[in-house]
Amino acid sequence: MFSRACEYGLRAVLYLASLNHDGYVSIREIGERLNISVPFLTKIFQKLTQAGLMQSLRGPSGGVMFARSPEEITLFDVIVAIDGPDLFTECVLGLPGCGEATPCPLHDHWKEVRNPIRNLFASTTLADMARRMQEARLRLTA
């Protein structure tokens, strides 16, 4: 459903949100921790920075940090910044010309679930996900 860049971007911002850290975090550190190529991760963070979700700073004490609080950034914001809005507006199979007049085989089914999925992503913040991740870790260690 998502591109690899989007999957990695979601993992990276969720990792950052779970750190509960206010300063810059090295992209190299994030890449090593999540086993994601640093050059690929850098391109992902460029998109997130261009979308106003992240700030970046070059140099030895640089890295990336949230431009807004994780309570204000939704999964939808991250997905659209990396993959664009097509998942929520275009044919799920990517078929040209798919629409009400000439629907693809999945059109009617996707039309029913597209908005609920969009709403789920739009109503779930990075802070929500970080809390859930923390709760899951606590359950595993108990």
Image: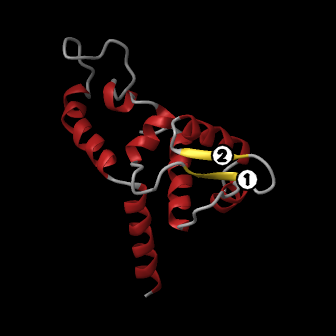
Of 87 and 127, which appears nearest the observer? 127
Image spot of residue 50 (x, y percent): 57, 34
Residue at the extreme bottom: 142
Earlier sequence position, callout 2 versus callout 1: 2
**Pointer 1 local density, CA inside 10 Å: few below 14, some 14–19, many at least 20:** some
Which label sits on residue 62?
1
Judge whether 134 appears above or below 61 on screen: below
- Residue displayed at 50% across by 61% down: 17
Image spot of residue 90 (x, y percent): 34, 24
The answer to whether 85 appears left or right of 21 in the picture is left
- Residue displayed at 41% across by 61% down: 127
Task: Locate residue 22: give its quadrant.
Answer: bottom right
On-image quarter of the C terminus:
bottom left
Image spot of residue 115 (x, y percent): 23, 37
Give the alpha-carbon distance from disc 2 to disc 1, as whole Å.
7 Å
Which label sits on residue 22?
none
What's the residue type where badge 1 is placed? Answer: Gly
Task: Please count the marks in the image.
Answer: 2
Which label sits on residue 56?
2
What's the residue type where badge 2 is placed? Answer: Ser
Would you say the residues marked 2 and 1 are in contact, meaning their CB atoms lie under 8 Å apart? yes
Judge whether 38 appears above or below 102 on screen: below
- Residue displayed at 45% across by 56% down: 70
